[in-house]
């Protein structure tokens, strides 16, 4: 998420007369259901919302406003955001808005529930690797170790809307912001009596109800080894389908290795623990988003423990030896269209 995103969004609106930020109102022939669709560029990503219902346009207007409000509050790189204020508070408590405080609380809860694999205080390390600017570099190990000594989500003190970070501790909510945003959008949709909608926030998909024809939504998940190709299709309704992968934002170092934007809080290096992609399917967008990042970090050894704890959530993971593994509950609802073998995860 960045301020740059807003500028690019404005540009896209100009460049795309039939898409961009313009609303399109169409009548679906199939069921004479009023539908609306909207493209937005925010949080550094392309977003699309398609909703069905008499109030589709009003719901989309409010959802769009909400997206930009959340972006302005949550961006760690924009010097007008609340997170920026918190990250530059020199150890003093800062009063947050209701939204931001709630999201920080939920994120901290997920940091604990994922045994610290999710850790919103890795931000200074993320910056050191250049992931916030695109000026990528492999930092000196001593520098990583120095920064690592300040990492730890338990350092974040929250009392209601007041948040306090020790000096040199900074947070970013990039791992959960889109999931939270899609939950908020669905609340808006429901308040406008929308019963059917699909929200795609840069590949993080959230569905409300079923398709207007009563069938499940079909969500394609990318092949991490060939990101322009689909790996599988998930059939679902009233669920989020959220993926974290090593192909989304990465650079190849001088040593020829791939370094991705998800940091392992154990050693301060980009996570490389056996997974190249993790998809989570479940009812809460923020939980799916938190879990996709955390399970990616946890990797083949530690992830089963987290998956077991979140038994209401389904997982489709791809290992670096080109195999798909999935939890039993999703087996009837996804179709592997890749050439990789897929097998169910057996918990012992
Ligand atoms: P994306 O936002 O690309 O869909 P993720 O949901 O996995 O992917 O979030 C990755 C983002 O989360 C990073 O860009 C960074 O802002 C943040 N991040 C990276 N590593 C961690 C971590 N271990 N814990 C919490 N946040 C992280
Ligand atoms: Mg995530």
Image (cartoon, rainbow, N blue to C red):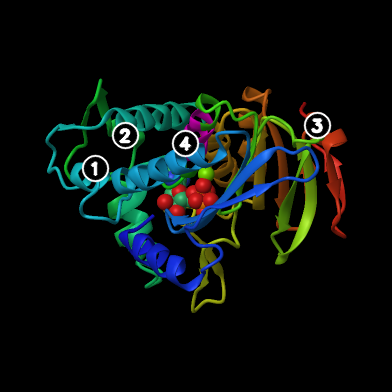
With 124 as the anchor, is 252 left or right in this view? right
Residue 2 spot, x, y in % from top left: 35, 58
Q: Per the image, is 185 magenta? A: yes
Q: From mark 1 to mark 3, how far is it between C-alphas?
A: 41 Å
Q: Which residue is farthest top?
A: 160
Could you say which disc has been placed on residue 266 in the image? Answer: none
Task: Identify the mark at residue 214; answer none if there is no mark.
Answer: 3
Q: Is residue 225 above or below residue 178?
A: below
Is residue 294 one of those drawn in magenta? no
Packing grade of label 4 (10 A; few <14, some 14-19, many >=20) is many
Q: Which residue is mark 1?
A: 82
Q: Quadrant of residue 160?
A: top left
- Residue under the point 31% across and 59% down: 3
> Which of pointers 4 and 3 indicates the residue nearer the eye?
3
Residue at x 29%, y 52% (from the top left corner) = 147
Cβ atoms at labels 1 and 2 below 8 Å apart:
yes
Magenta-highlighted residues:
181-188
**Dot 2 beta carbon under 8 Å from ligand 1:** no
């Amino acid at each position: 998420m960045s301020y740059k995103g807003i500028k690019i969004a404005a540009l896209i609106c100009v460049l795309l007369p039939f898409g961009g930020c313009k609303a399109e109102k169409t009548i679906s022939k199939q069921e004479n259901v009023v539908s609306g669709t909207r493209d937005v560029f925010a949080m550094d990503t392309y977003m699309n919302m398609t909703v069905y219902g008499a109030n589709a346009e009003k719901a989309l207007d409010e959802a769009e406003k909400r997206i930009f409000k959340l972006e302005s509050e949550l961006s760690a790189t924009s010097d007008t955001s609340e997170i920026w204020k918190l990250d530059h508070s020199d150890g003093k408590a800062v009063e947050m808005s209701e939204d931001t405080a709630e999201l920080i609380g939920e994120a901290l809860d997920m940091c604990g529930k994922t045994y610290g694999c999710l850790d919103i205080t890795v931000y200074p390390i993320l910056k050191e690797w250049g992931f916030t600017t695109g000026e990528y570099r492999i930092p000196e190990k001593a520098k990583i170790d120095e920064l690592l000594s300040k990492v730890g989500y338990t350092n974040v003190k929250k009392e209601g809307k007041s948040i306090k970070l020790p000096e040199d501790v900074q947070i970013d909510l990039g791992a959960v912001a889109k999931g939270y945003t899609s939950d908020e959008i669905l609340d808006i949709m429901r308040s406008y009596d929308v019963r059917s909608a699909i929200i795609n926030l840069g590949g993080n998909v959230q569905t409300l109800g079923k398709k207007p024809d009563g069938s499940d939504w079909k969500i394609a998940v990318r092949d991490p080894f060939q990101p322009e190709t689909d790996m599988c299709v998930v059939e679902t309704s009233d669920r989020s389908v959220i993926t974290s992968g090593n192909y989304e934002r990465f650079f190849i170092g001088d040593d020829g290795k791939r370094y991705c934007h998800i940091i392992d809080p154990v050693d301060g290096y980009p996570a490389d623990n056996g997974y190249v992609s993790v998809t989570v399917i479940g009812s809460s967008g923020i939980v799916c988003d938190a879990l996709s990042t955390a399970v990616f970090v946890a990797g083949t050894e530690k992830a089963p423990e987290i998956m077991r704890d979140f038994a209401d959530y389904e997982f489709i993971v791809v290992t670096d030896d080109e195999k798909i593994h999935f939890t039993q509950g999703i087996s009837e609802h996804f179709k592997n269209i890749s050439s990789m073998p897929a097998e169910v995860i057996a918990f012992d």
